[in-house]
Image (cartoon, rainbow, N blue to C red):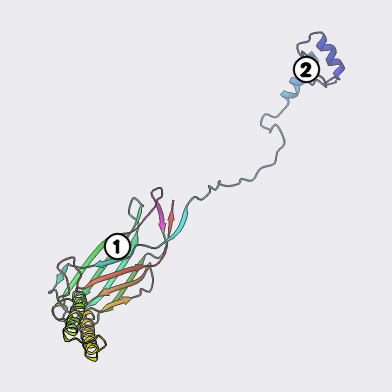
Amino acid sequence: MSLGRPSGACRSISASGDPWERGGRCGYQPFEAMKTPAALILGLTLLSSLDATAAPFPYKPVKPIGPITVQNLDQVVEVTPARLTNLVPQTLTRGDREFGGNGPDITCSVELRLPSDRRKVLADVHFRAVETKGDRSTTDQRWQKTVYTAPSDKKIKSLGSQTRSTVSFRSKKAGFQLLAPGEDMAAIFAKLDQFALQIADAHMKMSGLAYTHPEYKKAHAFIAEFNKGARDMLVKSNHVHNVVPSSGPVALLSIVGDTGGDDISDDANGKDDTRIEAITFKKIKVTLE
């Protein structure tokens, strides 16, 4: 049984107006044979003999390709957290406000973390100083500071692995203090320099002596030497301990322990008081999304 016929036949059928061939298509016509009763019976017989559970066409199982990986759109950047300065503890938990040259023993920790909105990086700072003798004067205070803010269209997914730095040490004993705190006296002596030189200039003019005269040089040298010694004595009464943590995000902690006067401040003015002079950070890795 032929399942098709050549194009010549299709032309003759189309010329006769056969609806199966309308339009005069050329080539073999596979549906032509299906119009006979014998062909229809044969087709139905074949269909009824097929296994309904069998696959209609032979195939090979395809190995699953696994989950589709979405392109990672996270952005990892290196940033330097903002430097923190002049953190002055005021909380007195024991004793008086004077360490009296007895230490103190100081512990300071800094930990970086993300708040719930993940829009910035916070630094939790904890400072504790304890007098080693006497009435064991103690200050213990915490601060929370923002040290980095993400771009307006980003959130922070995560921070680098090391987020905490801690140092512990005993403060050196401070020198004695005269008249005013060391930092204030540095400014006072700068003014005294100018004032003393103005007096010397006026004296030289009234005496009719030239500025190259040995007396002028002597007076100038004396003023400079006196002010330098006094300034050093007073400013160095506040020893700044620069401590490098062994690990974590902090590069350097600059801390004043014992001072020339009262140590634990009762206000936010850190002049000549126990304080964190500065916290300097390393670069840290931040993942933005």
Q: Give the residue pinned by disc 1.
A: 124
78 over 92 or under it: above or below: above
Residue 220 % position (x, y): 23, 86
Q: Which residues are magenta?
A: 149-158
> Residue flagged by tag 1: what amino acid is it?
Asp
Q: Secondary structure at mark 1?
A: strand
Are there few (<14), some (14-19), or many (20+) residues within 10 Å of tag 1?
some
Q: Is residue 38 left or right of residue 199?
A: right
Image location of residue 212, percent across then percent down:
27, 87
Which disc is residue 49 wearing? none
Marks 1 and 2, the one that precedes in the sequence? 2
Q: Is residue 150 left or right of residue 232?
A: right
Residue at 72% in and 28% down: 50
Residue identified by numbered label 2: 34
Left or right: 222 in relation to 26: left
Overall secondary structure of the magenta section: loop
Task: Choose top left, top right, bottom left or bottom right for residue 280.
Answer: bottom left
Query: Looking at this view, is 179 or 71 the one in front?
Result: 179
Alpha carbon separation for disc pair 1 and 2 = 86 Å
- Residue 206 lies in what quarter of the image? bottom left
Q: Residue 40 appears at what percent x and percent y? A: 76, 17
